[in-house]
Image (cartoon, rainbow, N blue to C red):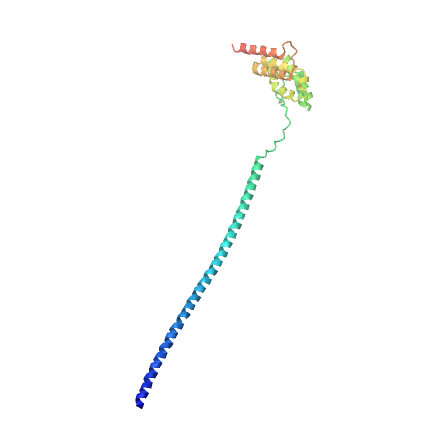
Amino acid sequence: MKYIAIILLVVLGIYLYNRAKKLAEDEQEQSGMPAEKEIFDESEADDTQGTDVNSVQEARISDAETAEMSVDSKAEGLVAEEKTAEKTESELASSEPEPEPAEDEPKVATVAVTDESWANEKLTLALSEYRGASDNTIKHVGLLGAIAECYKQRKQAQYKEYGAALSPYYLSLFAQLESPSSHKGVGFMHLSTLLNDCGVFDSAIDVCRKAIEYGLSDGTVTGFEGRIIRIEKAKAKSLK
């Protein structure tokens, strides 16, 4: 009886031990699940926090990039404005009319010195006066005297041809006189005759027309207009 009681106590103790162990294991399992959940939650929190940090960093990077793009855009705008301003200045500079060069005073054509050993004393003195003078009025007197002497001696070929060749020099000098219209037209009359006698009819007509422009007279009734008609008739006769 005593042994049976001991065995029952042992069995009961084993039973209680196993039950207590099982209960302990159940409690441990139940207590372990929340721990895992908390760990899981903490992991999610860490992930969420990491995501937030990344979002903040990305936002800062985006803001920085936006600011940089804005600065670059402004810089490009300034560069474009500077280029536009430079282009405008260049266009304005190129569009401004260049200063016109100062007009040189018209030069009077001068008769070159040639072999004039054939010339008489009057022609030689007249040419010396013409070439030695610096005043246009005095030069005109000298050249007019040379043309007049050639006109008088026009039956000689040298005088006739030399006098006709003085035509462009006389026209150039006459245009530089202070008051051309106040002078007489004798020089134009002599030259037109010399040119006509040399057969240079067109030049003779041009001399007469120039005299008409100055309002000069050749001392005849018909004037230089009548002289042109006579020269044209001589020209037509020479062509037959």
Above or below, 204 against 76 in this view is: above
Q: Is residue 154 visible?
A: no
Q: How far across and down, in percent of the image, does residue 195 sit?
A: 59, 15
Identify which residue is drawn at 30% across, 89% down: 3
Above or below, 62 against 8 in this view is: above
Identify which residue is drawn at 58% across, 11% down: 229
Q: How far across and down, in percent of the image, does residue 6 sit?
A: 32, 88
Q: Farthest residue toward the bottom?
A: 2
Q: How far across and down, in percent of the image, does residue 50 sit?
A: 46, 62
Identify which residue is drawn at 52% across, 50% down: 70
Q: Farthest residue toward the front?
A: 1
Q: Quadrant of residue 40?
A: bottom left
Q: How far across and down, in percent of the image, does residue 100 sit?
A: 61, 31
Above or below, 26 against 204 in this view is: below
238 vs 144, left or right, is left
Above or below, 30 against 96 in this view is: below
Figure quadrant of the N terminus: bottom left
Please name whichever residue, 30 or 58, is drawn nearer the observer in this view of the structure. 30
